[in-house]
Amino acid sequence: MEIKFITDDRFRKLDAIFSMFGQGSLPEPVKEFPSFFGKDVYLSSRIFEASVSIPKKQSIWDVCFDENPEKEIEKPEYAEIVSMLDNLDVHLEKENDDFFNELKGTISNSFSQKMEEIEKSIWEIFEMDLPKRLVIILDKHNIKTGSHGQKLATNKDISVIGYRIGELALKKDRNEPASVLLHELLHCLFSRYNVIADKNKRQFEEAVLRYFAPYGLLTKRLGLEKPNARGTYMDQLKGACSPEMAKRLNEIIPKYAEVADNEDFWEFLSKSELKSYINRI
């Protein structure tokens, strides 16, 4: 799997906008009352709305399926979005900041050293192939100890992820970027293979993936996390789903570790009361 990094200002602004507004609907007050929220927030909301309403495109992130996204976004059909992005006055670290070289090197080293194990593990657990290319929009987190990733787009061959991490967080744990990126990569693969049924799709998918990464069975298997980094699976489910679903998942999902060497995750789920949540039975 090839890894491509993007630190271009426009793409970092877009990543922040998608993180703020989510990949769904806009809060009505943001659209209707710019004087209350401020011109930059209002302009960001307009950029988001335009970015998810491009004819025949999933979103603006489809430009990252091209070999040269920075050039692709200059095409006439994106002119309105580009103009708004260039007028959005937000603080960004300079692309030549040493932080970006350090972060790129950390991620590249983690994946290159583990690529065969990552590919093998994801196939054995999920029967999924890695994309040919992983595009990562990198940024410096304004919270020095924080780290955040998000799935932005995926197709058959390419997955696009946004990732930002604080300077102190990077120094504290060199495995954190790869661990979080694996979680988001699994989101991309779940979308590509369409493995989760529509029933409570987003909530169920997020809750399930927290068992595997960034603090779970997959990252432990790959040696990419500290022992007991985030406590129990039940601890990780906080905020991911309802208390009722959390209890149900906690009773079932951890049992997969007992059979992981003999069957894939879908076979395991198909034998459980959660089989209605998946398409692969």
Image (spheres, grey):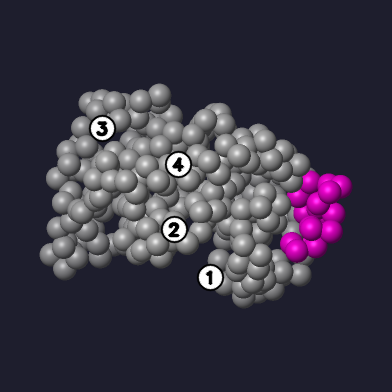
Q: Quadrant of the C terminus?
A: top right
Q: Is residue 210 visible?
A: no
| Dot 4 crowding, Cα within 10 Å, few <14, some 14–19, many 20+ | few
Q: Which one is in front, 73 or 203? A: 73
Q: Bin the neighbour count of mark 3 within 10 Å (Cα to Cα): few under 14, some 14-19, many 20 and up.
A: some
Specify few, some or many for label 2: CA neighbours under 10 Å numbering under 14, 14-19, or 20 or more.
Answer: few
Residue 239 circle label:
1
Query: Cα distance, mark 3 to mark 4?
Result: 31 Å
Mark nearer the N terminus (4 vs 1): 4
Q: Is mark 4 on a helix, strand or loop?
A: helix
| Residue 267 located within the stretch drawn in magenta | yes
- Which residues, given as a range, are shown in magenta? 253-273
Element at label 1 = loop
Q: Mark 4 points at which residue?
A: 105
Q: How far apart are marks 2 and 3 (CA)?
A: 37 Å
Q: Earlier in the sequence, mark 1 or mark 3?
A: 3
Image height check: is 110 above or below 146?
A: above
Question: N-terminal of the two: label 2 or label 3?
Answer: 3
Tell me what residue is drawn at x 56 percent, y 40 percent: 111
Q: Which of marks 3 and 4 is nearer the N terminus?
A: 3
Question: Real-space Cα distance between discs 2 and 4?
Answer: 13 Å
Choose the circle earlier in sequence order: 1 or 2.
Answer: 2
In the image, 11: left or right of 76? Answer: right
Label 3's element?
Answer: helix
